[in-house]
Image (cartoon, grey):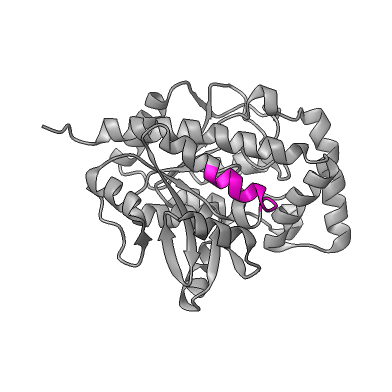
Amino acid sequence: MTTPHPRLILTEEVRAALHEGRPVVALESTIISHGMPYPRNVAMALEVEAIIRSYDVVPATIAVLHGQPRIGLSPDDLELLATSPDVTKTSVRDLAYVVARGGHGATTVASTMRLAALAGIRVFVTGGIGGVHRGASTTFDVSADLTELASTGVAVISAGVKSILDIGLTLETLETLGVPVISYGTDEFPAFYSRSSGFASPMRADSPEELAAIMHARWDLGIPGGISIANPVPAADEIPAEQINGIIDQALAEMAQAGITGKDTTPYLLGRIVELTDGTSLNTNIALVKNNAHLGAHLATAYTTLTQPPTT
């Protein structure tokens, strides 16, 4: 049985699953508010939740609404996140501010991890994780997702580091921070839109049970921090690296010319890439999130089976 932090507001579905030791998968909300256009963002969120439920696993989309950290959302909540102009992109640094002011916050990978851990949820599905931005040697722009992975015990399933970032430096930073990076079913680290990044994966696993055993061993040894699980986008849905790289370079150049910096960079770049690919990148983004949801449901089940005492 898991006892969530008292500040959290849980849906009855999530509360019952955690109390009974049944598998739960956390989902972020920045992808809804700042990652995709309406109404496809709401449709995606509902589809992902439906995929997870199809495995008898409970989805828990996480956000801050009216200053309350919420673990699990209603369809009306998803609609609010998708349409309200007053939703703040909320990382860990912003959580206390948004909560104290009674605002709405769409949680990033980092803040979703933190709230999931406070709820007792060990598996989290997202699209791509943040990392070291290109040009970080002068801008020092490094995502808080990396430091959160170093400190918070949640397994994060993504399609790799967002390919708008410096993948090589991100992998080096994760190594320095002691974060295991495990690619699922491949020896090459995936690159979000593409299955190929040109970088070898530090580790590989080929089944949810193997991933669950790694999670259990890490935390049983008392090693703090999370695990990054990179699940390649399905081959039928990928945009080959040689095709997407030039588009990313163009979007980066336009962003620099426009003077866009900080937490506005990723939403800008993802939106511009959708425009430059005539919507193909959005289709790929949705496909990879749904693919990650399938793996997340399997992993949550495997981890629960491994760690929960048998019922009599």
Q: Nearer the viewer, residue 35 or 165?
A: 35
- Farthest residue in the left direction? 312
Residue 294 in view in this figure: yes
Quadrant location of the C terminus in the rendered image = top left
Asked whether 265 falls inside the magenta stretch, the response is no
Q: Residue at x 55, y 46 (%)?
A: 45
Q: Position of residue 274 (x, y in %)?
A: 78, 45
Q: How many marks?
A: 0
Residue 26 vs residue 151, the one in the foreground: 26
In this rendering, position of residue 279 left or right of residue 183: right
Image-quadrant location for residue 257: bottom right
| Vertical side of 183 occupied by 3: above or below | below
- The part of the image, by quadrant, that contains residue 87 is bottom right
Q: Is residue 217 visible?
A: no
In the image, taking residue 40 as reference, residue 261 lies left or right, namely right
> In this picture, which residue range is highlighted in magenta?
35-46
Q: Nearer the viewer, residue 109 or 24?
A: 24
From the top left corner, tell me how far across and down residue 226 is, in percent. Answer: 44, 44
Residue at the image point whose x is 43% and y is 52% from the top:
151
Q: Residue 38: say if magenta.
A: yes
Please give the name of the residue rendered at 52% of the width and 51% of the height, measured from the top-left corner. Answer: 28
Give x and y (percent) for residue 296.
45, 35
Quick one: which residue is furthest to the bottom in this view? 101
Left or right: where 6 falls relative to 117: left
In the depicted structure, whether residue 84 falls above or below residue 296: below
